[in-house]
Amino acid sequence: MVKYGKVERLLKQGKIRRISELELERYLTFFENSYRDDLEHCKANLKTFPRWAIISGYYAMHDITKLLLAKKFRIKVDFQVHATTIAVLREVVKNRDISGLMERGYREFLSLASDLDEARRERVKVQYYTGTEFLRREYLKRAQEFYDSVVLEYLERLGGLVK
C-alpha cells in the first residue's frame, strides 16, 4: 500500500480502502471492461448526442483511473467517489499533466451535470437548451475537442501506467 499522507487520511476517513484478494480480480475485470465501454459509447455518440459523449468520455477517464488505483495500489474508492479518485490520483501519480487532464474532465462533467440539473428543474430551459441548432453545433464542437484533446490523451497516458 502506498504510504502517502493524504492517502493515509482518506483510508482513516473511510473514503478509500484496500481491495481484498477475493474481490481484486472481479474489480479489475469490471473496470477494464467499463472504461472501454464508456469510450466506445463516447465515440458512438459524438455527433448524435455530444453532451452524453462528454459524460461517457469522462467516465472512461474515471474508470481507467480506478483501474490504475486498484491494479497498482489495491485501492478502492468508496465515498465521494469522483473527488476522492482525483485526490488519490494526485498523490500516487506525481505527473501534473495527468492529474490536470482528469480534473479538466471532472470539471466538464460537473458543468454538464449542473446544466442538466438546472434543466430538469426548469422545463423551458431544457427545450431551449437541447432544441437550437446553435447549441447543438456548440456541443458537437465541444464534445469533439474534449474527446480528442482530453479523453484520448488521458487514456493513452494512464494506459501506459496501468500496464
Image (cartoon, rainbow, N blue to C red):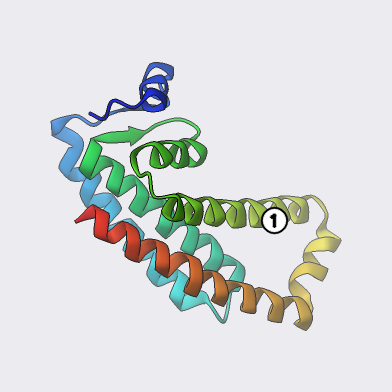
Which residue is situated farthest in the top direction here?
12
Of the 4 image quadrants, the one containing the N terminus is top left
**Image-quadrant location for residue 4:** top left
Which residue is situated farthest in the right direction here?
124
Q: Is residue 76 left or right of residue 121?
A: left
Quick one: SS at disc 1? helix
Identify the residue shown where x is 34% and y is 61%.
157
Q: In this view, does 159 lie to the left or right of 106?
A: left
Give amino acid for label 1.
Leu
Identify the residue shown where x is 51% and y is 75%.
45
Q: Where is residue 13 in the image (x, y as percent from the top left)?
A: 43, 18
Q: Where is residue 89 in the image (x, y as percent from the top left)?
A: 39, 42
Q: Position of residue 79 (x, y in %)?
A: 46, 30
Identify the residue shown where x is 62% and y is 50%.
110
Above/below status of 39 relative to 83 = below
**Image-quadrant location for residue 151:** bottom left
- Residue annotated with mark 1: 116
Identify the residue shown where x is 34% and y is 45%.
66
Q: How many numbered marks are there?
A: 1
Above/below status of 127 relative to 141 = above
Q: In this view, does 88 lie to the left or right of 123?
A: left
Of the 4 image quadrants, the one containing the C terminus is bottom left
Circle 1: is it few (<14), some (14-19), or many (20+) Cα within 10 Å? some
Q: Nearer the viewer, residue 65 or 157?
A: 157
Q: Where is residue 74 in the image (x, y as percent from the top left)?
A: 23, 35
